[in-house]
């Protein structure tokens, strides 16, 4: 309590000192010079008195704290990695008399600053606030480098009184703007022919696979699920709505698993194994769904979880989870991999596991998980070793430096085929074709 009172007294003392200095500079001095001019009857002294009184008026105006408003709008608000967008800022300033420094987002050190490259303009602006209000519209052009949803929420400012009558005033203005960066999705005509379990019904491909009477598993309720599928006993036990999922006629279940270990961060901040695994998973999900497959998405450690389903809504759910996908630092909870394995084993699906087998330890970790699955499929090994070199050269590499990982591949179960992909010189479409080629004769 004593310290807080002392601090309050100190702050009050500083304010009193500032007021006294301002009073002496803008009031006492003009009065003294005016008195001398009146007593001496010298007309040359009246001109300094006039300007000093003008300074007095401006000084009193400068003591007012400025009212700053910033409105931000990204156009377009959704872009893909590599595309450009324009951030428009409308800055309005009322009150005050001096220099105002405005810093627009993204600010240095934030995730948005690392994911967005400034191409044109600047996000730091200097204005002089005179007698009239300021209304400025600014445009900044950015290029999206990394997938994710980035919120541009705060604009910072510093106000400097033109006469130094008060100390600089700093603050922040809350803004409500965001930009969503979507992963790139490859367009390819090549696709696997999914073997159907039963004769497909005569319906559009997006609606292939009506629920059958064969129970598959229990999952969380999602908006749009029929109420007749709600499992009331499981809902009461787990204290949340759960529904029964049934096998769908004419469809095949495909599970996409994306590794979230620290091995996925090898590369640069914007070009690493995880940033290339996400567009590959999105491309495969859209391809399988458009051909009537029931597709699900899981991470390892087991987050996020998107239960298998069909239709374009399912693809949008998977895409939203992929945008927010991040590496899981540290160790996962004990038994989490086993619980994920039990979930996957219920439907006996086909599995596409995307990882980076950087070391023998990574290969043993992935093999430990795959051996507990009652499934078969493809393991995609994203090799990021050449990404830093390509990032420095700012061009594709034609003679990559390759390190053989065959000894790691031999540690994996034989029922999984391994596809190696080096994104430094192989395109996303090439990776998709490799996966499709590995699927032939399996599905």
Image: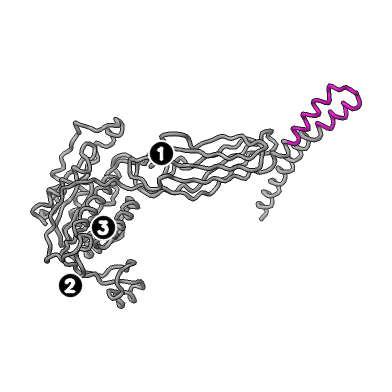
Real-space Cα separation, disc 2 to disc 3, in angstroms: 22 Å
Residue 48's quadrant in the figure?
A: top right
Residue 345 is at least partly visible in this image = no
Real-space Cα separation, disc 2 to disc 1, in angstroms: 51 Å
Real-space Cα separation, disc 3 to disc 1, in angstroms: 31 Å
Residue 387: percent from left, percent from top: 27, 37
Q: Earlier in the sequence, mark 2 or mark 3?
A: 2
Q: Is mark 3 on a helix, strand or loop?
A: strand
**Residue denoted by label 1:** 142
Front one among 112 and 73? 73
Residue 390 is at least partly visible in this image = yes
**Residue denoted by label 3:** 297
Front one among 107 and 222? 222
Q: Quadrant of the N terminus?
A: bottom right
Q: What element carries label 2?
A: strand
Image marks 2 and 3: residues in contact by CB distance under 8 Å: no
**Front disc: 3 or 1:** 1
> How is the structure coloured here?
one colour
On screen, residue 125 versus residue 23, left or right, reads left
Q: Earlier in the sequence, mark 2 or mark 1?
A: 1
Front one among 194 and 351? 194
**Residue denoted by label 2:** 214
């Amino acid at each position: 309590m004593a310290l807080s009172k002392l601090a309050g007294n100190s702050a009050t003392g500083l304010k009193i000192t500032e007021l006294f200095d301002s009073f002496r500079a803008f009031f006492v001095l003009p009065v003294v010079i005016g008195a001398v001019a009146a007593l001496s009857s010298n007309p040359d002294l009246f001109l300094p008195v006039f300007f000093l009184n003008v300074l007095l008026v401006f000084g009193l105006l400068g003591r007012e704290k400025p009212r700053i408003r910033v409105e931000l709008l990204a156009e377009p608000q959704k872009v893909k990695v590599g595309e450009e967008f324009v951030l428009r800022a409308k800055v309005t300033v009322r009150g005050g008399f001096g220099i105002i420094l405005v810093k627009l987002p993204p600010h240095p050190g934030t995730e948005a600053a690392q994911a967005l490259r400034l191409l044109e303009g600047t996000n730091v602006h200097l204005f002089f606030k005179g007698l009239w209000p300021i209304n400025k519209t600014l445009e900044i052009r950015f290029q999206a480098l990394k997938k994710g949803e980035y919120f541009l929420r705060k604009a910072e400012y510093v106000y400097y009184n033109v006469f130094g009558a008060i100390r600089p005033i700093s603050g922040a203005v809350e803004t409500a703007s965001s930009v969503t960066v979507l992963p790139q999705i490859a367009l390819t005509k090549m696709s696997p022919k999914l073997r159907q379990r039963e004769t497909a019904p005569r319906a559009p491909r997006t609606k292939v696979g009506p629920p059958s009477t064969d129970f598959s598993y229990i999952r969380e309720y999602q908006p749009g699920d029929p109420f007749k599928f709600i499992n009331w006993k499981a809902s009461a036990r787990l204290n949340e709505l759960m529904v029964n999922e049934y096998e769908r006629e004419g469809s095949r279940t495909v599970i996409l698993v994306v590794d979230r270990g620290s091995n996925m961060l090898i590369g640069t901040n914007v070009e690493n194994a995880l940033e290339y695994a996400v567009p590959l998973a999105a491309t495969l999900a859209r391809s399988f769904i458009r051909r009537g497959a029931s597709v699900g998405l899981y991470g390892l450690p087991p987050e996020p979880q998107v239960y298998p389903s069909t239709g374009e809504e399912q693809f949008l759910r998977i895409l939203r989870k992929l945008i927010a996908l991040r590496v899981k630092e540290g160790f996962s909870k004990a038994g989490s991999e086993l619980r994920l394995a039990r979930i996957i084993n219920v439907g006996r699906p086909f599995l596409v596991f995307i990882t980076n087998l950087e070391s023998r330890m990574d290969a043993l970790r992935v093999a430990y998980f795959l051996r507990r699955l009652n499934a078969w499929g493809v393991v995609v090994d994203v090799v990021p070793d050449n990404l830093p070199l390509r990032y420095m050269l700012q061009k594709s590499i034609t003679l990559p430096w390759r390190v053989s990982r065959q000894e790691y591949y031999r540690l994996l179960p034989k029922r999984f085929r391994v596809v190696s992909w080096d994104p430094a010189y192989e395109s996303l479409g090439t990776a998709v074709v490799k996966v499709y080629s590995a699927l032939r004769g399996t599905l």
